[in-house]
Image (cartoon, rainbow, N blue to C red):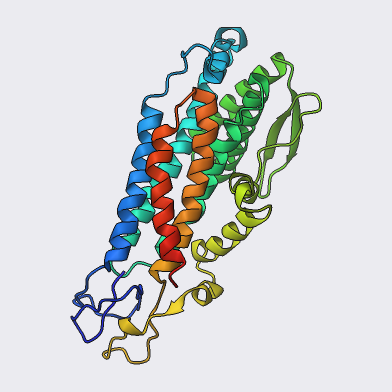
């Protein structure tokens, strides 16, 4: 994400410039503010990974242990490891959130990258939202399994819709058989099956459990939930704004600012666009709030001690707040 004055001469500025017609040999340096933001993002992601690495479901007294202690009771020939299966979904969601945070850091510290920076923020929030939803410390094992299997069944419906049964019969048949096994396991353990027509073809299955109903939340609902501390509709707004970049919608450009320091005289009719370090600091603060929500629920689930998290992450958030307020 460079800022240039004359061709080949970097300018000391906090503006990120992007011009699609800039020649590849234009030299430039990433402003110091962006390198610092990227490094702090890596610290956040790495710390969350350290906590996750040290998580043990067999820790007595933890919610994780309460879930895992029921594995044998809840397993059968169709699904011998229902608790472990959903635990893997939680881990995948957390890893996906961390991976996208690291991707954002890579974009922030790279030259001539603006749209991709914003695009990666949506899946970071959604992945954090999924983990946060499944780690909810107020629910019991049955409800955690219901939520997790609803995610799994929704994903399977998506895969079955994407696979052409005629050109890939073996893969489609194997996936369909897995879905049948999962549904049989659910019925055998007292869950009620709910079906609805998929958007394109096939059926989307979900599980109800008495008055606990509803399938997997939408991505926008997950974003709202994980960012609820910032306001009841804040997550929805973040999701909508970042979606403009994910889908390369025309109005995405209107969310950026003109970057005059990135002007290239060889392309005088191209308008450089970018983001300021203050705006980026605001956006990554939102992403880190989502990660903090996950860390809080994971702490309750795995019995983490969050002292180190608070000691490390709070000063980072303070630095970003100072940068954001310096507009």
Residue located at (36% from left, 38% from top): 47
Horizontal placement of 258 versus 163: left or right?
left
Q: Position of residue 181 (x, y in %)?
A: 61, 21
Q: Nearer the viewer, residue 150 or 13?
A: 13
Q: Position of residue 81 (x, y in %)?
A: 53, 16
Does residue 174 appear anywhere in the picture?
no
Horizontal placement of 93 versus 207: left or right?
left
What quarter of the picture does the N terminus occupy? bottom left
Q: Nearer the viewer, residue 284 or 309?
A: 309
User: How many numbered callouts?
Assistant: 0
Residue located at (34% from left, 54% from top): 105
Q: Is residue 185 above or below residue 116?
A: above
Does residue 68 appear anywhere in the picture?
yes
Horizontal placement of 205 versus 151: left or right?
right
What quarter of the picture does the C terminus occupy? bottom left
Q: Quadrant of residue 249?
A: bottom right
Single out the residue that lies furthest toward the right: 211
Q: Quadrant of residue 238?
A: bottom right
Q: Nearer the viewer, residue 50 or 189?
A: 50
Horizontal placement of 193 versus 235: left or right?
right
Q: Is residue 5 above or below residue 68?
A: below
Q: Quadrant of residue 132?
A: top right
Single out the residue that lies furthest toward the top: 73
Residue located at (21% from left, 74% from top): 28
Q: Position of residue 134 (x, y in %)?
A: 59, 32
Q: Position of residue 27 (x, y in %)?
A: 19, 75
Residue located at (41% from left, 61% from top): 117
């Amino acid at each position: 994400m460079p800022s240039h004055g004359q061709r080949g001469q970097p300018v000391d500025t906090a503006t990120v410039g992007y011009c699609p017609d800039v020649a590849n040999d234009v030299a430039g340096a990433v402003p110091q503010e962006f390198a610092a933001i990227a490094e702090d993002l890596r610290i956040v992601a790495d710390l969350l990974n350290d906590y996750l690495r040290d998580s043990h479901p067999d820790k007595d007294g933890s919610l994780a242990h309460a879930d895992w202690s029921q594995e044998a009771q809840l397993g059968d020939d169709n699904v011998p490891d229902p608790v472990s299966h959903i635990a893997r979904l939680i881990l995948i969601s957390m890893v996906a959130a961390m991976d996208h945070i690291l991707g954002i850091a890579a974009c922030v510290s790279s030259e001539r990258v603006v749209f991709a920076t914003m695009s990666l923020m949506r899946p970071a929030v959604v992945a954090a939202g999924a983990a946060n939803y499944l780690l909810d410390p107020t629910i019991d094992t049955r409800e955690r399994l219901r939520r997790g299997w609803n995610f799994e069944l929704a994903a399977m419906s998506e895969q079955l819709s994407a696979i052409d049964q005629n050109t890939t019969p073996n893969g489609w048949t194997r996936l369909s058989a897995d879905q049948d096994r999962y549904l049989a396991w659910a019925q055998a353990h007292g869950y009620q099956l709910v079906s609805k027509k998929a958007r394109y073809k096939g059926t989307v299955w979900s599980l109800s459990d008495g008055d606990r109903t509803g399938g997997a939340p939408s991505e926008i609902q997950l974003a709202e939930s994980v960012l609820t501390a910032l306001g009841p509709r804040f997550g929805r707004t973040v999701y909508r704004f970042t979606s403009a970049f994910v889908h390369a919608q025309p109005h995405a450009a209107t969310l950026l600012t003109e970057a005059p320091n990135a002007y290239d005289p060889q392309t005088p009719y191209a308008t450089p666009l970018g983001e300021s370090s203050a705006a980026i600091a605001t956006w990554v603060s939102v992403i880190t709030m989502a990660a903090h929500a996950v860390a809080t629920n994971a702490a309750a689930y795995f019995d983490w001690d969050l002292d180190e998290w608070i000691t490390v992450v709070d000063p980072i958030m303070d630095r970003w707040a100072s940068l954001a307020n310096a507009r």
